[in-house]
Amino acid sequence: MVLALLGGKDVRHAELAARFPGSAHNASVIRRVERFFDRHPIQPADVARVVLTLLPSAQPREFILDRTNWKYGQTDVNVLLLAVIWRGVAIPLLYELLPHGGSSHTEIRHTLMDDALCLLRAADIRVLYADREFVGYDWIQGLARRGIPICVRLRSDTLMDDWIAKD
C-alpha cells in the first residue's frame, strides 16, 4: 500500500489499485484498498512520522506553533497546529481541533507537544517559534521542563519585569 501511495502520488482508490501487482480484477483490488483504509485509518501521528523521516536529516530542526480559525460554511474551525520548518516553509505535522473559538489553553498546547515528543526528542528541536498568544508562566515552564527552547514574538508594549519588549 505504501509503495502504491508513494509511487503514484495519487490517493484515489482506483489509481492505487492500478499500481498493485498481480492479475486480480481491478474491482477486487479496489475493494481490498477500501478494506485496508477501513481497518487501518491513518492517524496524524503516522503522517507526521513519515514527513519527519522523509525530510533531510538536518538536526535539530525548527518548529512553529500557530493557531488559525476560519469559517467552513456555517461551521467555525479553530485549529492549533505544530509544523516543522523546511526551506522556509512550514510543513504541518500535528494539530488539535479546538472545540471553542478564541485562543488555546495551556493544557491542550502541552498535550500537542507531548504528542510531538512521541515522534522526536526534545534535543531534535532547535527552537519552537510561537506567536504572542502563546505566553504564560505554566506554558513556558512546561516547555522548559521538557527541554524545548522557545522563541515567542511579543507585543511591543509587553512588560517583562521592568522592561518593555520594544526596548
Image: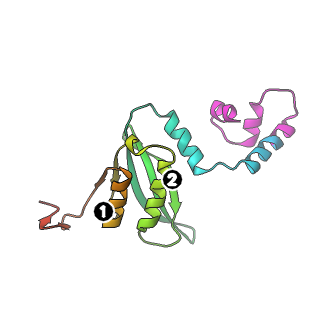
Q: Does the segment drawn in magenta span residue 4?
A: yes
Asked whether 108 or 167 is in front, the reply is: 108
Where's residue 103, x and y in %?
41, 69
The residue at 39%/53% (across/down) is 146
Residue nearer the viewer, 165 or 122 = 122
Residue at 14%, 65% in the rendered image: 164
What range is drawn magenta here? 1-30
Residue 136 visible in the displayed image: no
Residue identifier under label 1: 132
| Residue furthest to the top | 22
Mark 1 or mark 2: whose residue is earlier in sequence: 2
Q: Give the side of residue 26 with respect to residue 160, left or right.
A: right
- Residue contact between numbered discs 1 and 2, judged by CB atoms under 8 Å: no
Q: Amino acid at mark 2?
A: Asp
Other residues around mark 2 within 10 Å, as few (<14) / some (14–19) / many (≥20): some
Label 1 amino acid? Answer: Arg
Q: Which mark is residue 99?
A: none
Give how far apart the Cα atoms at labels 1 and 2 are: 22 Å
Q: Which residue is mark 2?
A: 115
Give the structural element (helix, strand or loop) at label 2: helix
Quarter of the image that includes the C terminus:
bottom left
